[in-house]
Amino acid sequence: MFARAAVRALNSQPRLFSTTAARNTKVVVLGAGGGIGQPLSLLLKTDPLVTSLNLYDIRGAPGVAADVSHIDTPSEVQGFAADKLDEALDGVEVVVIPAGVPRKPGMTRDDLFNTNASIVRDLASAVGRVAPTAHILVISNPVNSTVPIVASTLAKAGVYNPARVFGVTTLDVVRAARFTAGLAGVHPNDTPVPVIGGHSGTTIVPLLSQSAHGKGIKGELYDKLIYRIQFGGDEVVQAKDGAGSATLSMAYAGATFANALFRGLNGEKGVVTPTFVESPLYKDQGIDFFSSNVELGVNGVEKIHPLGPLSAEEEKLLAACLPELKKNIERGRAFVESS
Ligand SMILES: NC(=O)C1=CN([C@@H]2O[C@H](COP(=O)(O)OP(=O)(O)OC[C@H]3O[C@@H](n4cnc5c(N)ncnc54)[C@H](O)[C@@H]3O)[C@@H](O)[C@H]2O)C=CC1
Ligand SMILES: O=C([O-])CC(=O)C(=O)O
């Protein structure tokens, strides 16, 4: 069904579904009935590295599970109703969280905080209790705050391991490759662009200078491309006109990141992709979470790569990113502290 690319080297564009060997992975999707949850569950059902797929939502998951379970791949699918969260989490190794409300036109991701913070905190608390060693992939927005919420919630429960909590920023990487390829007239596979920082507006920092086809894009074209990558989410929110935000491209991005993690857990070497994790890169400025190229391995985060050389424009983008990111992280932390 999907092109299976060879093992990817550093800085190459991650693809659905690169794999080298079979492995048993038990996965749960929390929020599986939603706009992202449904197509993401479909894609995970077709991932050869997933053997068991649990689908949970406060509404609709058993129906989605019955539907997806008919797909003729080997994995076993089970649906769980609202009161069956602990059962859904039992024995899972990877937890993917797209639960929460999406934006409407005129809203920022930060405007989702009041609703999504408690949803994510409560789900993280259940993961900490039932599946404390699971890897957690956070999709729910605002990612810049929900990842610190998950980390602080697990820390409060005494089970936080920074190597196992990931904010999924892959959609920024997917957009950067797609938009750059369009401008350069080449295949997106040949235009990987590292995207660092966070996942909202100006906290999204694409490093076009590190992309073979991106580095030649200058002037007004450069400014427009950066804006489009940073505000790609708004483009979809406006086009959907009140019906939500990116779901299908996000499901693709979520499944792509999940597959990269499964491959790392499987012992594959050289699986490197940007993700928002606890990071030493800007800790000296009080910024504990940051997205950058991360090598994924048997323990989750294996190595956080240095950023590499930045252009003068990228230094400016980063300077605009850091204070906003710091504020978003602090908001997430403070929420758990006061809970
Ligand atoms: N990280 C990223 O790049 C992206 C993140 N998102 C975010 O993903 C989230 C979900 O978006 P959509 O799927 O479009 O929204 P949606 O409203 O279609 O689906 C959300 C689902 O979460 C469920 N849910 C709510 N509370 C829950 C709980 N306590 N436990 C389990 N399930 C619960 C709902 O019943 C619903 O089925 C939003 O916060 C959105 O902003 C969206 C696109 C990209
Ligand atoms: O824009 C939104 O609200 C959803 C999202 O995170 C994205 O599409 O990147």
Image (cartoon, helix red, strand yellow):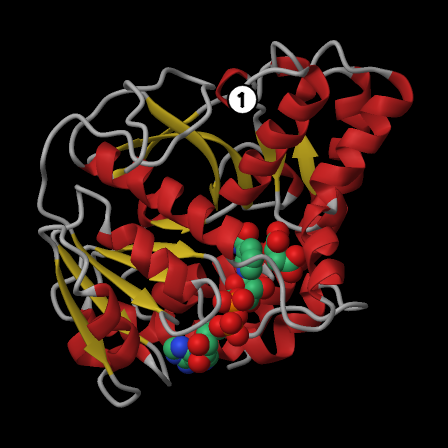
On the image, the x and y values in percent for residue 19 come to 21, 30
On the image, the x and y values in percent for residue 121 come to 44, 74
Q: Residue at x 73, y 55 (%)?
A: 234
Q: Is residue 122 visible?
A: no
Q: Which residue is mark 1?
A: 192
Q: Residue at x 79, y 38 (%)?
A: 227
266, 18: nearer the viewer: 18
Compared across the picture, whether 249 is left or right of 27 comes to right
Residue occupying the far bottom of the picture:
83
Q: Quadrant of residue 129?
A: bottom left
User: Which structural element holds mark 1?
Assistant: loop
Location of the N terminus (image quadrant): top left
On the image, the x and y values in percent for residue 238 come to 76, 61
Compared across the picture, whether 291 is left or right of 138 comes to right
Q: Is residue 199 visible?
A: yes
Q: Hey, what amino acid is under mark 1?
A: Pro
Q: Residue at x 81, y 68 (%)?
A: 106
Q: Quadrant of residue 301?
A: top left
Q: Residue at x 20, y 70 (%)?
A: 89
Location of residue 81 with respect to 314 vertically, above or below: below
Q: Residues within 10 Å of mark 1 (few under 14, many from 20)?
A: many
Location of residue 337 with respect to 214 vertically, above or below: below
Quadrant in which ligand 2 is drawn: bottom right
Compared across the picture, whether 155 is left or right of 268 comes to right
